[in-house]
Image: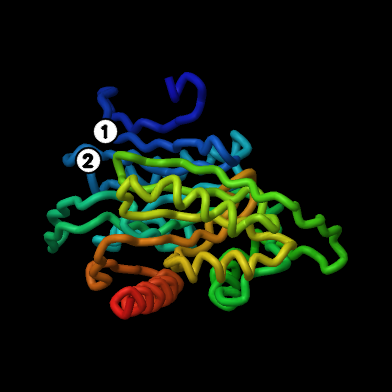
């Protein structure tokens, strides 16, 4: 059904006799003109023969033809293999999502671990009409600028003379609950002067669900979001990173609240920027844990 309605499309590598040797797909976002690369499979006897490279190149071409503005991948942090693959195709790291899925056992590639699944968001722009927000939240401005600097060839900066929009009086929050992952995603479509009250009501409505993680996406734009970031930090949220073009072709800052113990020694970052993001996330996670211990 997803393929029929083009929410998903992919490429198949075949042997000389016509049999399947590999499969790679893109799942289109229902909220923005971007897609997630995933579901990569190569038959064991045909691995290390360049099939993954050919299929990825095909997917990137197909995505451009369909008018997508970007592709992203969720690269596992239990090892750096998938992060390395993404970097080869000019994907760049923008966020570290902690405990995205329940505990899973990883075997092979010289390691064995059982951990909550964390992922690095790797992003590949497919458009040169991507505007960098004029205002970035002060606590993360330097790090966000470093993340954006990876994409200078695709970005243009908004002018100080650009038309600004009045701040909405009401706050518009969307809530998506993933029961199978014990997590929730809150998307702020608009941030108004009712932000704190709206958050309190929403947090109260989900507090009995025993979630392990809550992710909160804040829109980056012309209106400063410093007070929203400060409020979330005071309520146990820490940084995750930049979610580029993730909602309605707009950039979002993701914050995350982690209600499980995490061992950052098992979270591996391949690129320098991914390492910087991990360092900041760990710092805030440790600070939160200390505050909880005092309480």
Q: Position of residue 43 (x, y in %)?
A: 21, 37
Dot placed on the residue nearer the N-terminal end, 2 or 1: 1
Quadrant location, the C terminus = bottom left
Nearest the viewer among 179 and 36 is 179
Q: Report whether residue 129 is seen.
A: yes
Residue shown at the point (82%, 66%) measured from the top left: 159
Placement of 289 over or under 119, stated as above or below: below
Disc sitting over residue 46 in the figure: 2
Quarter where residue 16 is shown: top left
Q: Position of residue 163 (x, y in %)?
A: 86, 58
Q: Is residue 105 left or right of residue 219?
A: left
Disc sitting over residue 221 in the figure: none
Alpha carbon of mark 2 to alpha carbon of mark 1: how far?
7 Å
Nearest the viewer among 180 and 65 is 180
Residue shown at the point (54%, 39%) measured from the top left: 63
Q: Position of residue 21 (x, y in %)?
A: 26, 33
Placement of 42 over or under 70, stated as above or below: above
Q: Which residue is mark 1?
A: 21
State yes or no: discs 2 and 1 in contact (Cβ < 8 Å): yes
Q: How many numbered discs sit on the rendered protein? A: 2
């Amino acid at each position: 059904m997803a393929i029929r309605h083009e929410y998903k499309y992919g490429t198949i590598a075949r042997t000389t006799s016509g049999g399947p040797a590999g499969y790679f797909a893109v799942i289109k976002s229902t909220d923005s003109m971007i897609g997630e690369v995933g579901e990569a499979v190569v038959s064991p006897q045909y691995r290390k023969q360049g099939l993954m490279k050919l299929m990825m190149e095909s997917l990137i071409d197909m995505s451009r033809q369909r008018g997508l503005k970007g592709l992203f991948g969720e690269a596992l942090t239990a090892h750096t293999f998938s992060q390395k693959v993404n970097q080869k195709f000019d994907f760049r790291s923008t966020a570290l999502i902690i405990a995205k899925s329940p505990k899973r056992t990883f075997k092979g590639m010289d390691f064995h671990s059982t951990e909550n699944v964390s992922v690095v968001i790797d992003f590949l722009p497919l458009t040169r009409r991507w505007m960098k927000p004029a205002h970035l939240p002060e606590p993360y401005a330097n790090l966000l600028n470093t993340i954006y600097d990876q994409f200078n060839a695709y970005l243009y900066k908004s002018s100080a003379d650009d038309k600004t929009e009045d701040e909405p009086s009401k706050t518009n929050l969307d809530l998506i609950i993933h029961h199978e992952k014990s997590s929730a995603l809150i998307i702020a479509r608009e941030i108004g002067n009712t932000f704190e009250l709206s958050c309190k009501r929403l947090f109260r409505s989900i507090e009995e669900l025993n979630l392990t993680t809550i992710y909160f996406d804040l829109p980056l734009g012309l209106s400063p979001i410093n007070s929203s970031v400060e409020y979330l930090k005071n309520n146990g949220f820490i940084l995750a990173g930049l979610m580029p073009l993730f909602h309605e072709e707009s950039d979002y800052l993701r914050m995350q609240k982690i209600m499980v113990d995490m061992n950052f020694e098992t979270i591996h970052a391949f690129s320098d920027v991914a390492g910087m993001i991990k360092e900041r996330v760990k710092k805030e996670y440790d600070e939160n844990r200390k505050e909880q211990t005092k309480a």
